[in-house]
Image (tube, rainbow, N blue to C red):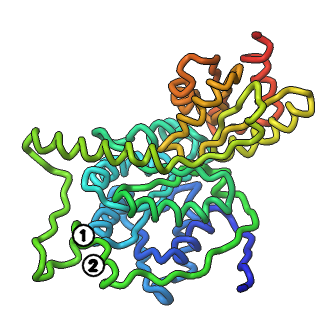
Amino acid sequence: MAEKEVKLMKGNEVIAHAAIRYGCDGYFGYPITPQSEVMETLMELKPWETTGMVVLQAESEISSINMVYGGASTGKRVMTSSSSPGISLMAEGISYLAGAELPCLIINCQRGGPGLGTIQPSQGDYFQACKGGGHGDYHLIVFAPNSVQEMHDHVFEAFDLAFKYRNPAMILADGAIGQMMEKVVLAPQRPRKTDAEIAAECRTWATYGKPADRERNIVTSLELQSEKMEIINQRLQAKYKAMEENEVRFEAVDCDDADYVIVAFGSSARICSATVEMARAEGLKVGLLRPITLYPFPTKQIAQLAARGVKGFLSAELNAGQMVEDVRLAVNGAAPVAHYGRQGGMLFAPDEVLAALKEKLIDKK
């Protein structure tokens, strides 16, 4: 058995290593704190000399997302990364990618807002990532890593699902996960897809050149006839339904006997895992449900906990209350649902979450 390759590195840095090792064809981005190390690491590693991967700093976020659109149209594995205000600038292009059904990977290492805000971590982009962000009825596949290892692993998973469903995928991290250093096991290097492999895999839609034995492929999100546009939308909705049925990923910690369940993702979930330990030490039966995919959301799993008799749910987020809406929809009135959060780049501590759980749910009984 080959020896595992283990490194100590930042979350942002490992994104770059994972992209190269996955066999990514191209990265197009623009620097913004706190995710600039993604591009900096790619430039340092010079994958164009080893795998042939293109790495290009665009003149803006708008340019970078449209370069992604062009690369994705040809069936190549392409990606970009940015942080909250930069993702806002990409919103139109992301909607175009979803409308044209183009697979790609987008990294958002969130910072506090609104506006320019702060460069400190936040989870204020949940609505933007999971409810569209751009115009029209569409969804991204959204992963929420809570460790440097998951930053690495989700690159592989997100790219695979993006191509499985021909849909843009996003890794929604934050400044804490992007900047922290942890041990990570790196995957072995995969070769990039050859032009022949891309032609075979993406034959029905990609614009890699017209062979003699098929019609010309046209990539567009434009359809001026309303009747046809409705059919396209219905096809997209059926695809999203398939994602919701088959691609939900979550982690449940001490939920089997829990009277109260904390729902948290990303860096918040790391903090709340300690809250669960503190609560259990006090004799309180508290569990943690961590959505790994924010879309598709673990609605059924939360509903099952509510049906089992969980007395209350606390959605712990670094925002004013966003994911809590999806938790409430899942619980559907079967139990009380409360929110606890910090904003502006502030992190909460495990004991703060436990105090909020007691105040908002346990002591109200």
Quadrant where the N terminus is found in the figure:
bottom right
For this orientation, the residue located farthest to the front is: 308
Secondary structure under tag 1 reads loop
Q: Amino acid at mark 1?
A: Ala
Q: Residue at x 63, y 33 (%)?
A: 343
Residue 333, compared with residue 298, is above or below; it is above
The residue closer to the viewer here, 184 or 70, is 184
Query: Is residue 30 visible in the rendered structure shown here?
Result: no
The residue beneath circle 2 is 199
The residue closer to the viewer here, 23 or 37, is 23
Secondary structure under tag 2 reads helix
The residue beneath circle 1 is 206
Task: Give the alpha-carbon distance from disc 2 to disc 1, as whole Å.
Answer: 8 Å
Q: Amino acid at mark 2?
A: Ala
Q: Residue at x 50, y 36 (%)?
A: 114
Residue 40 horizontal/vertical position (percent): 55, 71
Query: Is residue 6 visible in the rendered structure shown here?
Result: yes
